[in-house]
């Protein structure tokens, strides 16, 4: 098949306006996605074919999370689309074009898989369903984006839906547009995709949109409207953060901070971490048994999700003790501690719990049952008919607000949280919920 024949075939498949916008983008980082059914996979394949044809000797890498997904969504369709034009080398999972361009197909399903791209060099990288990749995988593989060409700027393309282990990373860069030092906002473009944009799907399967419209409200917002605050697999769908109700405290778990009354009990929950973040939360309990997360100390590197500050236990408990001496919510108060039972373990030396005691920070062993703990959290997050839950979060506890709503279910353990995610605050919250349990679910 000639280049002209292939180009004629491609012209017969007209992109929708959003896909055209995706095709035109040449900034370093372009993300395309949001809702289901927007035609993202087709757009990614077509984009890479067009680049390979236009620029001789271009080196491209297109990735999916697993080999099964890669074969179904890209290898097989590309073999059909490029049949007679580009040569597919099965052992290398690569298409070689007549002009010398090379499109490699890859996957990354675990920490070891990322190493296969170490030392490689590409002009273009594409992460299909990017929120299914760990942020550290994306960062590591992106270091292979290297070129000395004068006629082409290196770039990375992402397609994505809300949810998954990379949700917070993609949301920070493309939705919230919060950048760290060294990240140039002009290098990042987000193109929203919705099912309404996909004329082919709308015409061939008009019932599909009715199926999305029939979903429960939270899932409908994610799948149909592309809302990045709710998404598929979200564990704590009940969680709401509505600034309009921070003062009246109705139908919002996040509320305006205040100094808890002296008659309320104060608790401290704790989950240890070193290379991963540690988490310490302080809670007030009112006379109805309602929990208020009033303060937190989260040992996470700023703007680097799920990366621990690597504080020693001595440093952690020195800071906790100082906070409890000085903070107006906590000073001169009796504080009841609960922590992960693992901190009492000894491996030939002093346990973490013993180090805490040396600093005057005392804990009881928490109940570490995972599913019952999550159920207790679900119950507390439920709103009654007046919009009042049994758990509130002060608006100053930004790490809780960032991490807990993004947790998704473990793909292999029903009702459990995926432990690959940033679940440290959720864990110490679970210990707290099991420490002050609600005995029966609220209607």
Image (tube, rainbow, N blue to C red):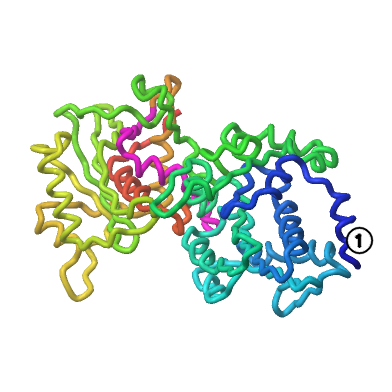
State left or right for residue 94 relative to residue 235. right
Q: Is residue 396 magenta?
A: yes
Q: Residue at x 70, y 55 (%)?
A: 44
Of 72 and 415, nearer the camera is: 72
State left or right for residue 3 relative to residue 431. right
Residue 275 lies in quadrant: bottom left
Task: Report if residue 438 is visible in the image.
Answer: yes
Q: Residue at x 41, y 35 (%)?
A: 381
Residue ranking furthest to the bottom? 91
Q: Residue at x 36, y 43 (%)?
A: 400
- Under circle 1, the secondary element is helix
Position in image of residue 61 (x %, y %): 65, 66
Of 148 and 40, nearer the camera is: 148
Position in image of residue 152 (x %, y %): 64, 61
In magenta, the rendered stretch is 389-415
Position in image of residue 258 (x %, y %): 24, 27
Residue that label 1 marks: 5
Q: Is residue 285 magenta?
A: no
Dot 1: few (<14), some (14–19), or many (≥20) neighbours within 10 Å?
few
């Amino acid at each position: 098949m000639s280049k002209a024949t292939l180009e004629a075939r491609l012209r017969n498949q007209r992109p929708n306006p959003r896909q055209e916008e995706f095709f035109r983008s040449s900034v370093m980082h372009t993300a395309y996605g949001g809702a289901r059914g927007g035609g993202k996979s087709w757009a990614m394949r077509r984009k890479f074919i067009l680049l390979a044809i236009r620029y001789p000797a271009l080196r491209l890498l297109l990735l999916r999370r697993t080999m099964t997904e890669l074969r179904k969504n890209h290898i097989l369709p590309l073999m059909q689309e490029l049949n007679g034009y580009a040569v597919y080398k099965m052992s290398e999972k690569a298409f070689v074009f007549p002009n010398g361009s090379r499109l490699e197909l890859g996957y990354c399903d675990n920490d070891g898989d990322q190493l296969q791209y170490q030392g490689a060099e590409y002009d273009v990288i594409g992460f299909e369903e990017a929120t299914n990749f760990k942020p550290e995988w994306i960062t590591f593989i992106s270091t292979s984006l290297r070129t000395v060409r004068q006629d082409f700027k290196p770039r990375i393309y992402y397609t994505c839906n809300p949810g998954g282990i990379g949700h917070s990373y993609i949301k920070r860069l493309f939705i919230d547009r919060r950048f760290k030092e060294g990240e140039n906002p002009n290098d990042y473009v987000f193109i929203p995709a919705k099912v309404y944009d996909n004329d082919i799907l709308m015409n061939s399967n008009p019932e599909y949109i009715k199926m999305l419209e029939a979903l429960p409200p939270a899932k409908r917002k994610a799948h149909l409207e592309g809302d990045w605050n709710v998404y598929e697999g979200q564990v704590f769908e009940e969680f709401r953060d509505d600034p309009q109700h921070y003062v009246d405290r109705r139908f919002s778990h996040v509320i305006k901070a205040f100094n808890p009354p002296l008659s309320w009990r104060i608790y401290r929950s704790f989950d240890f971490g070193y290379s991963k973040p540690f988490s310490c939360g302080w809670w007030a309990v009112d006379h109805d048994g309602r929990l208020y997360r009033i303060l937190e100390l989260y040992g996470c590197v700023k703007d680097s999700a799920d990366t621990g500050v690597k504080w020693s236990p001595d440093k952690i408990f020195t800071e906790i003790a100082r906070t409890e001496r000085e903070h107006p919510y906590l000073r001169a108060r009796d504080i009841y501690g609960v922590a992960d039972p693992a901190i009492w373990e000894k491996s030939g030396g002093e346990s973490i719990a013993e180090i805490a005691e040396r600093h005057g920070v005392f804990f009881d062993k928490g109940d570490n049952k995972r599913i019952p703990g999550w159920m207790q959290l679900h119950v507390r997050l439920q709103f009654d008919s007046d919009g009042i839950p049994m758990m509130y979060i002060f608006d100053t506890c930004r790490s809780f607000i960032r991490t807990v709503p993004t947790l998704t279910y473990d793909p292999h353990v029903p009702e459990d949280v995926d432990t690959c995610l940033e679940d440290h605050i959720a864990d110490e919250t679970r210990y707290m919920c099991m420490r002050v349990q609600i005995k029966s679910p609220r209607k």
